[in-house]
Amino acid sequence: MQAYVMTRYGDAGAMEVRDVPEPVARDGEVLIRVRAAGLNPIDYKIREGKMRLVNRLDLPQVAGSELSGVVEGVGAGVTRFAVGDRVFARVDKKKLGAYAAYAVVHETMVAKMPESLDFADAAGLPLAGLTALQALRDELGVATGDRVFISGGAGGVGTLAIQLAVWMGAEVATTASPRGEELVRSLGATTVINYQKQKFKDVLSDYDGAFDLTGGQDLPDSFAILKRGAKTVSIGGVPVPANARVDLDAGPVVAAALRVASARIRRQARQRGVGYRYMFMHPSGEDLNLLAGLVDKGTLKAVTDRVFPFEQIAEGFAYLEQGRAKGKVVVQM
Ligand SMILES: NC(=O)c1ccc[n+]([C@@H]2O[C@H](COP(=O)([O-])OP(=O)(O)OC[C@H]3O[C@@H](n4cnc5c(N)ncnc54)[C@H](OP(=O)(O)O)[C@@H]3O)[C@@H](O)[C@H]2O)c1
């Protein structure tokens, strides 16, 4: 079958379309005929070798983190899915494999896709949707009446995070350039700061929580707009030692490296009297069910920026890597 394969760590040339054997569903796994797959910054960060410390892959490896498609077969013990089901999934982080005609995914990571979506829109939901849900619900504990700041609201994660925070009852402030302002307002953000003209820390104060998507100076700046005791959860900044045990299944060497790397940012948070946590999202069929329900109720809208044919996946990545996508970039098989 045709697949987009990462052959080494490096630049865009490190991935290529190749013929590879079809995968086989083992115990508990579902074989999916892939109809569409989402492109994510994590895919090119993996290719660039930035995740090597926490997730070393056996190369060559079929790339791709999320997909939608149709169940083609099931391994022994699979009870939740049957041949013909329309499903979507954030695939196993160590196995990847979404950019291919067929993929196998453990059934615990799979859910029936929203009935109201086509395959392209559904393929862009799992990774960004689970990230936004887990950050806002599990890390920030967003509740009715909270004021929440989300940096970078116009991208893949931001467009879903704004909507989920509003669903949880929060009032949302976000940063966007004029290119994204109308979009983030239409999704429910009530305060939009043009990050090209103004520093959000000069405008906002007394927030109940911050979700940092952009990292860099935005991360310590987010501490300055929080109430004392409130927290920033980041997916754009620096991981902390706790991530090694909780999220990465890694030992003391990784924890020690993260302790050193995050020392400064943790100190900055302490000095401000706020909490800081980096988050790695977790694949979850159960959480995907929740997201699918919200989509079918009309509460959550998939925002797809561009759809490329699989043959043009390299162009899709070139577009995504410019960092300007409004919502999700997807390839159709
Ligand atoms: N830890 C995890 O589990 C996890 C999970 C998912 C994603 N992530 C990370 O989260 C980050 C965001 O992912 P994504 O998929 O949302 O990325 P994305 O879709 O590529 O984000 C692009 C958007 O970001 C906006 N943007 C860029 N720089 C900005 C800035 N300084 N301030 C405000 N907006 C800015 C751009 O708007 P303009 O065109 O208007 O500039 C564009 O609309 C990535 O670094 C990704 O690797 C981590």
Image (cartoon, helix red, strand yellow):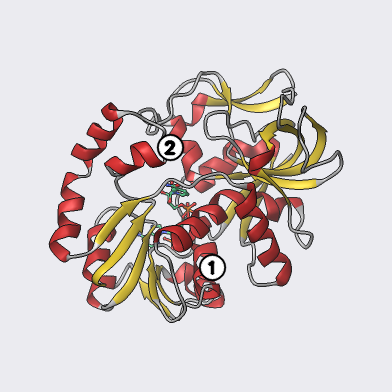
Q: Which residue is mark 2?
A: 45
**Helix, strand or loop status at disc 1:** helix
Considering only vertical position in the picture, is 147 above or below 24? below
Quick one: label 1, few (<14), some, or many (20+) residues within 10 Å? many
Please indicate whether residue 315 sits to the left or right of residue 144 in the image: right
- Name which quarter of the figure residue 45 lies in: top left
Residue 73: x %, y % from top left = 82, 32
Compute the Cα span from label 2 to label 1: 26 Å
Q: Which residue is mark 1?
A: 164
- Name which quarter of the figure residue 244 lies in: top left
Amino acid under disc 1: Leu
Amino acid under disc 2: Lys
Tell which tag, 2 or 1, sits nearer the viewer: 1
Residue behind label 2 places its C-beta within 8 angstroms of ligand 1? yes
From where the camera sits, is residue 124 visible? no
Quadrant hosting ligand 1: bottom left
Considering only vertical position in the picture, is 219 above or below 179? above
Q: Looking at the image, which residue sits at the far right? A: 84
Name the residue rendered at 69%, 55% in the picture: 121
Quarter occupied by the C terminus = top right
